[in-house]
Amino acid sequence: MKRLACWSLALMPLIAFVGCQSTRVQSTYLGGDRFESRPTSHPIEILRGDPTRPFVTVARITAVARGNSYLGTVGDEEECIGKLKERARQLGGDAVIQFEVYMAPQGTVGAGNITAQGFVVRWVERS
């Protein structure tokens, strides 16, 4: 029994490390039409500003890749952006505009977390 307790204590940091490395995505529809999902092969553009072509805004979107400040690990930015694009496709979008990505610095709440956010938009055909 004592040996089992020792192994449990030895594995706790590993379990904490694995359990805290995840990416969570949240989106909020901003009224208007809802669209069918795009196929997984549909490219999602990432734009830091506003596009020059006409669009409708579908949703506000935020993805957080969790780090672990206890172990000094940082969230995976590439995975975070990938999950953001995946959700944009599910929402029927063509792009994420006003895109921002940042990391919470060490010594703050959420240290090591990577956050990517923006607005999912769908292009409108000019008539």
Image (tube, rainbow, N blue to C red):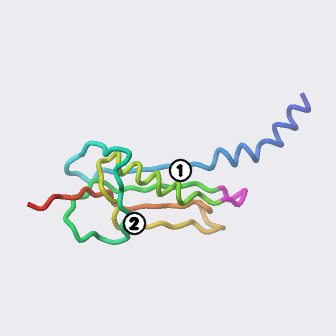
Name the residue rendered at 34%, 56% in the picture: 60
**Is 125 displayed left or right of 107 in the figure?**
left
Give the image location of residue 96, x and y in percent: 35, 60
Q: Amino acid at mark 1?
A: Thr
Lower position in the chain sequence, tag 2 or tag 1: 1
Name the residue rendered at 88%, 38% in the picture: 6
> Could you tell me which quadrant the N terminus lies in?
top right
The residue singled out by tag 1 in the image is 23
**Is 13 displayed left or right of 39 in the figure?**
right
Extreme-right residue of the structure: 2
Label 2 and label 1: CA atoms lie apart by 17 Å
**Is 11 displayed left or right of 59 in the figure?**
right
Main secondary-structure element of the magenta-colored stretch: loop
Question: What segment carries the magenta color?
Answer: 68-73
Give the image location of residue 62, x and y in percent: 43, 56
**10 Å crowding of disc 2: few (<14), some (14-19), many (20+):** some
The residue singled out by tag 2 in the image is 99
- In reply to whether residue 93 is colored magenta, the answer given is no
| Secondary structure found at label 1 | strand
Q: Amino acid at mark 2?
A: Phe
Q: Is residue 19 above or below residue 55?
A: above
Give the image location of residue 19, x and y in percent: 64, 44
Residue 18 lies in what quarter of the image? top right
